[in-house]
Image (tube, rainbow, N blue to C red):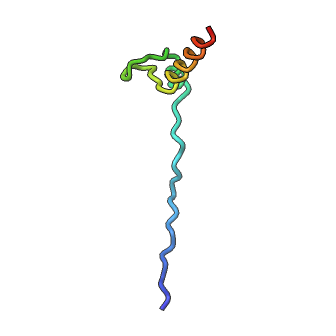
Amino acid sequence: MHRVVPEMKISKKTKLIKRLPLEAVLRLTSFPVTTQKGEKGYNRKKLQEQNRKNARDDIQQ
């Protein structure tokens, strides 16, 4: 009463890592950081870092 286990199928295609071309990456990073959510250059992480830096500068003054 052995149960037959089907062999695992190995996919012929391996998924490639999707990468942006270099020109696109440079275009993305060249935009200044904006505060408007829909605009190009909006980056929440960078905005948070800027706010922390501004707060530190205010404390030091």
Rendered position, 9 above or below 59: below
Towards the viewer: 46 or 53: 53
Quadrant (top left, top right, bottom left, bottom right) of the C terminus: top right
Image x and y of residue 19, in percent: 53, 35
Image x and y of residue 13, in percent: 51, 54
Q: How many marks on residues?
A: 0
Residue farthest along the right direction in this orientation: 60
Image x and y of residue 50, in percent: 54, 18
Apparent side of residue 42 relative to residue 29 in the rendered image (left or right): left
Residue farthest along the top direction in this orientation: 61
Rendered position, 44 above or below 1: above
Residue drawn at (53%, 52%), measured in percent from left and top?
14
Residue drawn at (63%, 11%), measured in percent from left and top?
60
Residue farthest along the bottom direction in this orientation: 1
Image x and y of residue 44, in percent: 47, 26
Residue drawn at (51%, 32%), measured in percent from left and top?
20
Residue drawn at (53%, 21%), measured in percent from left and top?
29
Towards the viewer: 33 or 10: 33
Towards the viewer: 5 or 55: 55
